[in-house]
Image (cartoon, rainbow, N blue to C red):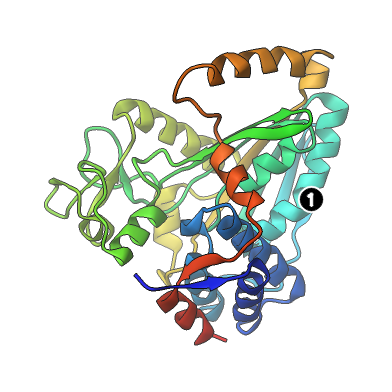
Amino acid sequence: MNTTPLELENIYDLAFKALSAHGCDQLNANCVATTVTHAERDGSVSHGLFRIPGYVASLKSKKVNGVSRPSNTYLTQNAIRVEGDYGFAPVSIKVGLPELINTTNKHGVGVLTIANTHHFAALWHETEALAENNLIGIACTAYKPSVAPAGAKKPLFGTNPISFAWPRKNKTPVVYDMATSTMAMGEVQVAARDGHKVPFGTGLNKEGEKTDDPSKIANGGVLLTFGDYKGSAIAMMIELLAAGLVGDLFSFEAKEEDNNDGGPARGGEFIMALSPELIAGKNWNEHAEKFFAQMISLDGVRLPGQRRHTNREDKGPRNINSDLIEKIKSLI
């Protein structure tokens, strides 16, 4: 694979120009380009520039509103709903997250439900932002079916990721963001593009047989849940939280509605924030740090999110797939 080094500001400019060229105004293009740049910065390449052609496809098809103006509605004193105006999710998150932070600091618990958006990014952006404000963050979202429930060979679930972040005073937060499938579909697609195999049993081919060929999983095959029935149960929970509770589309409904332009389908997101200061008390941080100290005292253990934060310290260029750069440039 040929790569080209790009500075972070050049990654942002490339994403911003491609989005702007196809109907995004400054607010929408900035939110998405920032999210994409942060993904590349932190090493989450499957959610970085790799996603731009899909974002553009959904703008060209008019499925996504590139000039969206999301708005907040308080359902209760603790529950806020963001009406996404059929735009990209990062715009709704920018609008809703400050209200969620304020609500949680007042009441100890806050819930943000985001409806009528198109989510194509990692979830750690929002949970980490909550943790940086000394709040615990939990977020999940569903997607079009690509994952078979335990015992099945046909997809029903999306990759249905979930993210959790725990704040640490004067330290980077502990954050994980994981698909409930064996791998995120974006990672499978990147492996197929780059000619890499995936662990055997990551998914099934179209004949229903386990395979290590990512192209056979991504084209007519199906991903499996991690941990068999355990991951399947968590994927089901996410469908109910991000669709049933939000009042937006389940994965199978998103498939029925989507125009298959290659961009993100419509759906919802569930975000919960908790204040350890109000719930656990003043010594919440010191108590949790004792636990983290025990974890990292074990050989081979690192705290979730540590690799991304280490990558973030590198302010230099990132090596981007050269063909992808040319493809995005052709869209401008």
Q: Which quadrant of the figure has residue 296? A: top right
In the image, is residue 29 above or below residue 285?
Answer: below
Residue 215 found in image quarter: bottom left
Q: Quadrant of the N terminus?
A: bottom left
Instruction: Tell me which residue sits at (25%, 43%) in the image.
Output: 199
Tally of numbered tags: 1
Q: Mark 1 — residue?
A: 72
* Residue 237 visible, this angle: yes
User: In the rendered image of this protein, does residue 119 appear above or below residue 297?
Assistant: below
Between 232 and 326, which is closer to the camera in this rendering? 326
Does residue 155 lie above or below 120 as drawn? above
Estimate the x, y position of residue 4 in percent, counting from the top left. Answer: 48, 74
Horizontal side of residue 149 vs 127, given as left or right: left
Left-right relation of 200 to 112? left
Relative placement, left or right, of 17 versus 2 is right
Could you tell me the amino acid type at mark 1? Asn
The answer to whether 229 appears left or right of 287 in the picture is: left
